Amino acid sequence: MTLRTIKDLLHHGNPGEAVTLQGWVRTKREQKSLSFLNINDGSAMAGLQVVVNDTLEDYEAVIKRLNTGASVAVTGSLVESPAKGQRLELTAETLTVYGEADDSYPLQKKRHSFEFLRTIGHLRSRTNTLGAVFRVRNACAQAIHAFFRSRDFLWMHTPILTASDCEGAGEMFTVTGLNLNQLPKTDQGQVDFSQDFFGKPTYLTVSGQLEAEIMAMAFTNVYTFGPTFRAENSNTSRHLAEFWMVEPEMAFCNLEGNMDLAEAFLKFVFQFVLDHCEDDMAFFNQRIDNTILETAQNIINEAFERLTYTEAVALLQKTDQDFTYPVEWGIDLQSEHERYLAETIFKKPVIVTDYPAEIKAFYMRLNDDGKTVAAMDVLAPKVGEIIGGSQREERLEVLEPRLEAAGLPKKDYWWYLDLRRYGTVPHAGFGLGFERLVQFMTGMGNIRDVIPFPRTPENIDF
Ligand code: 4AD
Ligand code: MG
């Protein structure tokens, strides 16, 4: 007899089939001559109801051991269920208890706050909500690969350890092999990184973009999808110190092509998740945010709004909304502004382009006005910025001074400049914050609840 997941049994099981399933007890209901167990194995939102008759060997003793949280294997036959809301149930013929869970098991049958669940990061994935989140997260990742594969993008693995600061923001975690209690010093009293593992200061990457650009100059269309790290001390519901980013990079592409890709990409991922996670999405709509299914349809069917930064600033200045940060041309848009545009003014995702050069990274292509760059941010209702990208500066003579102005030494970025020396082409790309996408998709309010093991200031236990 083959082992089957509960998801498989629920969808493809037939009455009369003999099966074995394994999982954890969610609930137990004891009646006079039989007990009902709800067993969940994480493969689906729903568990399978198991009926245990008191004719089972050692019935009393076995049932006593089966509290919420206990792990079991059950063999028996599927039967049509007389109960409402389930097609099948399993009549147990043999039942093995792998491990008991006593009354101290923290996930008893009641609603727990997400704050509390974060304190039991090793157990919270066994709850309905976190279970649904991580199944949707998995589907998003599958969708991303499916989307890029359908367009012949090559998946490239970019490094986690790096010597360069892609965003030029200096928010990097240092990685060292040096003994911190006995740091070698230079004559000037600085740490002597020439004695470190790589012979120079080394960090965890904030983005795979620079390496993705190298690969796009060989393979035309590529993407990277991996963890990125930012040592910004932001304790918000949208920031993590370790998050995953999806970064496509396209040679022979301009800002418009970049926007078109970002929009098609989000539409595809939403459709894929609706198709593959129906129960989980229905659960979020019922329990977390009753607008998410409507939002998903809106993303799929409506064209995103596109406007320039200058237009966005003018619109924000026209409203009587009281912003904490006043709006004027030149400011970096704050999350309150981003959300106002997407949530209140347009009620759908908004792509803002052509930001002031001053507030954007050195690699973004300078526009003809000499003041703005070919940047684009995709802003989503409730979440704010979920994508940041740009057309890249492909002109060596324009890039060099931008690099210097950002305080990044030319000698360290010689290879990046070389890409402009040898067969340079117009190119563009973007980065999608994977957790912000999952937040947007599920309606979950805090980014810490859409990644299995969140890293935020002073939080690294699990
Ligand atoms: O806008 P960002 O900083 O862009 C880049 O890193 C570019 N190099 C991407 C590229 O063009 N290839 O970051 C991209 C996205 C943001 O829009 C946001 O969704 C997410 O990454 N992000 C974060 N997500 C969670 N926690 C943080 N601390 C984040 N910082 C950025
Ligand atoms: Mg950004």
Image (cartoon, rainbow, N blue to C red):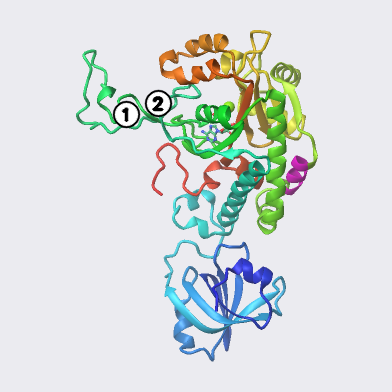
Residue drawn at (71%, 28%), measured in percent from left and top? 257
Give the amino acid at mark 2. Answer: Ala
What whole-number distance in Å separates the C-alpha atoms at marks 1 and 2?
A: 9 Å
Question: Is residue 246 visible from the viewing direction of this image?
Answer: no
- Which quadrant is the N terminus positioned in? bottom right
Q: Looking at the image, which is closer to me, 111 or 394?
A: 394
- Quarter holding ligand 2: top right
Instruction: Indicate the secondary structure of the residue bearing disc 2.
Output: loop
Instruction: Indicate the secondary structure of the residue bearing disc 1.
Output: loop
State whether residue 223 is above or below residue 281.
above
Picture coordinates of residue 130, whole percent (x, y): 56, 54
Please tell me the numbered disc located at residue 378.
none
Picture coordinates of residue 351, whole percent (x, y): 70, 28
Q: Which residues are magenta?
A: 292-300
Question: Residue 296 lies in magenta, yes or no?
Answer: yes
Residue drawn at (71%, 54%), measured in percent from left and top? 275
Return the residue found at the far bottom.
55
Residue drawn at (63%, 16%), measured in percent from left and top? 373
State whether residue 13 is above or below residue 397.
below
Q: Do callouts 1 and 2 mark residues in contact (Cβ within 8 Å)? A: yes
Return the residue found at the far left.
182
Question: Residue 165 lies in magenta, yes or no?
Answer: no
Q: Which residue is identified by label 1?
A: 198
Graded by Cα atoms within 10 Å as few (under 14), some (14 to 19) or many (20 or more), the crowding at tag 2 reads some
